[in-house]
Amino acid sequence: MRRSTTVSFDGIFQTTQNAYNEGSAFVTTCPIAPDASYTYEVPLGDQSGTFWYHSELSVQYVDGLRGPLIVYDPQDPQAHLYDVDDLSTIIQLGDWWQVSSETLLAGYQGDGVVPISDSGTVNGIGRFQGGPEVPFAVTEVISGKRYRLRIINESARNVFTVSIDNHPLTIIEADGVATVPHTVDTIDMLAGQRYSVVITADQPVANYWLNAPFTGGAPAQNATLSRSILRYKGAPIAEPTTPWTAGPVNGTSLVEANLRPLEAIPAPPADVNITLDLTVVAGTAIWNVNNVSYLPPKAPTLNQILAGADTDVDFNVTENTFVLPPHKTVQISFPPTDDDDAHPLHLHGNNFWVIKSMSSPDINTVNPIRRDVVGVGGSGTTIRFRTDNAGPWFFHCHIFWHKAAGLATVLVSDPKVIQKETKPSKAWKALCPAYDALDPALQ
């Protein structure tokens, strides 16, 4: 794996003053060198919800540098809907390879075929074809109680379809934004997405399967290996006696466009319109956004801004950087494509209104869901966000293999305010000289 690292905190709105602690390699910081240390200070403001952290350097988090970041709200307006919300109810979904990320990335760059994970994991535990029958992860519940499960897709590629046998899922949060309760049987979760769901332990005391089959390339894996156990207190310490399935056959699946925020905030009219067209160079590990494949600059975007860069032309074309005016509403449209696979586009430093989800032809500017990871592809997607939070914010595919192949842009909101208000620490200023001095094998 890569020896240096950076860590970002998905869903947390870093402030302009703290943009240098945002953790995006070569956008807001240089990586931390081996045997060195760096302390990220992360003001949470008034945010609460389900977030996560991971390495932002190359595809390093594939090797395991990732985990949950939960910010509890002592005045949660939805607290009356559940009885239990603690460490035991965090559900981390992930993908796992038996080979290191550097080897996998080299293979991808050689043949253009995205690596297929050997396993899907639930709370770090999974099986693979032909591998040992390790015990599945267990979430214990008590009859009659209601549980808030915070489900996080920490994968670098896989889409997980989540369900629990005989237990409907009532969604009350998406990507840190409280939602109007919405009950479904299955949820397709893209890489980087998070949902809080409430389940009621109202079934006979027994063991039940939490199903999390995944998709992510061909040849198909035995995706039904990806699962865990919901165990009622008093049930045998054993696997459920019911068959492994991919979930209910005729259940209600989540349609993203049907989600509504608990606090409805209409999307303002667009002041700036941007269209982003995502294309791949066939047979290669090269993805383009508007015919540009992103390449990380030697000097991070923030360093360049602090040195005076404040227009699009101040950045190399391969940095795919858009300089945006302050306090405006930006609309980004992704045209329809023949590719029904969803690219999970993730915006740092902000979230956005999903004006048009790829799950529906409808346009909603009255009460659309706000989130920070959205699927792009198929019927097209449209989002809007405000440029009130000045900073250089990475906007990239959360299939990290695609990100490494150039499927990324940088959205710079108000560089003049960044230059005025962002005052990096001495420790941050020391990162680039230390990293640049490293032997490439240690970077």
Image (spheres, rainbow, N blue to C red):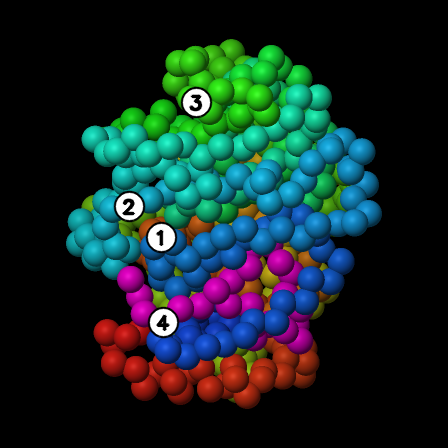
Q: Position of residue 41 (x, y in %)?
A: 61, 71
- Label 2, label 1: how many angstroms apart (C-alpha)? 8 Å
Cα separation, mark 3 vs mark 1, equals 31 Å
The residue closer to the viewer here, 10 or 345, is 10
Residue 97, numbered circle: 2
Labels 3 and 2: the sequence-earlier one: 2
| Label 1: element kind | helix
Eyeballing the image, is 121 above or below 229? Answer: below
Find residue 437 and report its horizontal and vertical position in percent. 32, 86
Numbered range of the magenta stretch? 1-23
Tell whether label 1 touches label 2 (CB within 8 Å).
yes
Q: Amino acid at mark 4?
A: Ser
Label 1, residues with CA under 10 Å away: few <14, some 14-19, many ≥20: many
Neighbor class of circle 3 (other Cα within 10 Å; few <14, some 14-19, many 20+) is few
Taking the magenta stretch, the answer to whether it contains residue 14 is: yes
The mark nearer the N terminus, 3 or 1, is: 1
Three-letter code, disc 2: Trp
Labels 1 and 4: the sequence-earlier one: 4
Q: Check disc 2 and report its element: helix, strand or loop.
A: loop
Viewer-closest of 296 and 279: 296
| Three-letter residue code for mark 1 | Val
Precedes in sequence: disc 2 or disc 1: 1
Under circle 4, the secondary element is loop
Alpha-carbon span between mark 2 and mark 4:
20 Å
Q: Which residue is mark 3?
A: 238
Mark number for residue 62?
A: 1
Q: Is residue 396 magenta?
A: no
- Give the mark, 2 or 4, whose residue is nearer the N terminus: 4
User: Can you tell which quarter of the image residue 291 is in?
Assistant: bottom left
